[in-house]
Image (tube, rainbow, N blue to C red):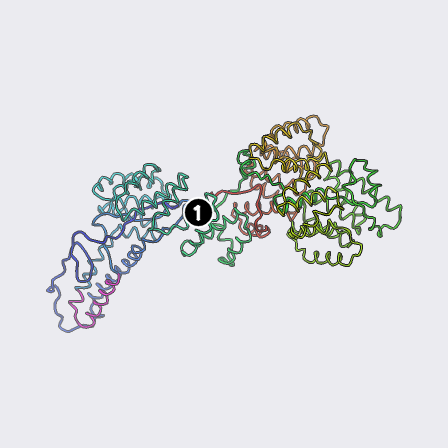
Amino acid sequence: MVEEEVILKEKEETSGGEENSSGFSRNDTNTQDDSSFEEAPREKKWYEDTKFVFILAVLLGAVAILLVVLSFLFSQKSEPRGVLIPTTPQAHQANADNESFKFDMSKMDNMIQKANALYLQGEREQALQVYEQIALYSEALSNYNLGVSQMNQNNYALALESFKKAIESNENQTASAINAAVCALRLNDMPKFQYYLDLAYVYLPNEGNSKLFNYYLSLINYYKGFYPEALQMLQLTNDESYVDNARYLSAKIYAKMGLDAKALENLQKQRNFESSLSQGLIYARMGDYARAKTALERSLKVDKERNQSIAALNLIDLKTGKYQDMLSRIRAFYQGAEKTTLNTYKIKVRLKKELFDIQTAQDNFSKDFLQDKKAQADFLFYFAPYQVFDTKQAANYINKANIVDFLEDKKDGIELLNASQMLSSVNVKLAKIISKVFENKLEEANSEFKTLLNSYQEHSILHYNLALSYAQLQNYDLAYKHFSSSYHLDPKNYAAGAFAVLAGNLSQKSTIKLVNEINENISVDDEFKANIYQNILLFANNDNAAMLPFLDDNTESSPLSFMLKSIIAKNNGLYNQMDAQLARLKNAVKDDILADILLFNAQNSNLNIKEYAQNAQLHFKDTELNYKALAGGANLIRENYINLMRVSGLLNQEREKIKEELALGTQDEAGLSSILAYMDIYAGLYAEAYALYDTLINDFNRKDSTTYFLAAVAAIGSNNTNAAIALLELAKLEDGSNQEARVALGLLYQEVQNYEPALYHYGQVENNFQSKFFTFDLR
């Protein structure tokens, strides 16, 4: 809300003085005698009369100034400039008996027209009497009223001088001193602010008989920061004309004290001021964004509040992930000057409290691990099989139990490798790389797939495997690129086609043409048997009902099919079937930590968060965790496990275990350092996390998008904005689909007031995207 100044309202009745024929009231009604004007030898034209022209010029000048002030005085029913947040001073006037005149502008115009007409008709003496009368009334243009006018024009230096003169001439001394203090505050002259505030307190006893005594005292207490005392006096304000003013100022004080509900109550009771903007900002501060937007859209209709209302609506869109809505609004109102609106409010980017505060994390924790399309897609990628030429040969080479469930035979793709010796050689090479995936060395496997692809650039299976490793590392941009290449090299590789569409969705690519191509190929394929991938294609296009028949398809019994059926059941509200499919998944991959988490969550999702956390402690406390999987496997393992440990209160216990493993030196040092750094973020140890990420990037050459991004998260937690921006730019270069990096860059560029790149990055983020890491406060 804005600061309060004093409001001097016009009085309906005047004390002292008489009502003259022109409808103006004044204290002195004496006029010059007719004898003061001598008859001229001949009648001059009005423009030849020097004395008259001089008087007329003076009067018209006075009237012009008077019109400015009166236009301000008649506008006191409108909402003062400014809003609840951030706080800015705003001028109001104060009322005292016998210190204000009620001017009727139409009568003033009539008087001027009458005087002009009389003079032109030769009635010179009567005309001069009327002009003199106007001059006498213009004395009502006091230093006090002039100061108020100057405040309204934001000329606080001149206004301060006018109020100083008013005080010296005993004009509205208390009100003048308060307004002088506000002018000094606007001029950032704190010594003068304090001086005039103290002076107002000195003059306050003179207002002992005024109905506005309590109101004046409340204003003084308000500016001194004595909010409870100010509220007490506002409640005692008994002048009916000032009840709404008291409520409005009470609302400001309650807002400053953080009592938003009380502030809203007072705003809604008063009728004197248009408060939609203030109400909208309070609702926004309370997190009630729907009501906030309703109020702010009302305030858009008030011209002087439009810019601030748009800026506030933009902030709500940033908070709620409506990036494209925000940009559409900015373009509509600021075409060609879009960046100007971001300058209204200054922001400070911070990490969300739920990252490091257990209570907040528990309050915001969703027991739905399959809550959105991205999460569901990540689980499908995680349980998807890698492709080889000969499943049996590859499985024998890898020599790992149950590995066949994660391999897919693609013998129909051997036409590019005609020689059997070459086929066997490539299959062995593929098996060696895939074995590293199962040894939880996903980054290393990804690198070796890229190297092998250099030798066989035109082969579908190599592109597919590289794409799948990228998808499990959550680099959807490159996953889409290589899945698409794989499908175009082999139109019967429906796994590649379906996953290309899914990765394309996550990286905001247009996949309409690719979907049509796949469906056309399926329609002419007499040997089509890839029913599971046709359903993944339906999932990618959000066609949940069309996938229901797959729940009854028993021809598929792979981990991927169980995962897909769980998602289909969940998306169609069949939660019992979802739980049954997750149980089958857990039975198929007994040692998999993610399958364990999904089943635990399904079995405990009906509990409140405290009971849920307690059961999680009992279930996972003594679990023999595969630290290799946590350190070097898919990103999804780390995210879900640490999230569960965080809300269950086991995070610090797990951190200590990781530190012990690092001290032993028997495990993957880079992988364990990565996990420890990630845990340090959630423990609020940002400096430690940043140091570990610096080591990972520079010493272990971990230069993937995720590592850069998490290093930036640690940098923001450490208040190192410049480092965060540099790291996020690198994260974006490594993976253009990294929406979190785009959001963070937009917010950080806005924080440092570099608005053009901020708007650019907001433009790259899809509507309804919710950042898990970042939010902001107003500075």
Magenta range is 105-128
- Figure quadrant of the N terminus: top left
Residue 550: x and y, percent? Answer: 70, 49
Q: Position of residue 707 (x, y in %)?
A: 65, 40
In this rendering, does residue 328 appear at all?
A: yes
| Amino acid under disc 1 | Leu
Q: Position of residue 198 (x, y in %)?
A: 29, 38
**Left of 62 or right of it: where is 384?**
right
Q: Most extreme residue toward the bottom, as rendered?
A: 42
Marks counted in the figure total 1
Picture layout, residue 123 above or below residue 550? below
Camera-nearest residue between 514 and 507: 514
Q: Does the magenta stretch include residue 494?
A: no
Reply yes or no: does residue 108 show up in magenta: yes
Q: Is residue 277 shown left or right of residue 6?
A: right
Q: Where is residue 106 in the image (x, y as percent from the top left)?
A: 26, 63
Q: Quadrant of residue 213?
A: top left
Disc 1 element: helix
Give the image quarter of residue 676.
top right
Residue under numbered circle 1: 281
Left or right side of 398 for 197: left
Q: Which residue lies at the image location 80% right of the left edge and 52% below the top edge?
A: 458
Is residue 690 in sight in this rendering?
Answer: no
Characterize the magenta stretch by its predominant secondary structure: helix
- Residue at 26%, 61% in the rendered image: 105
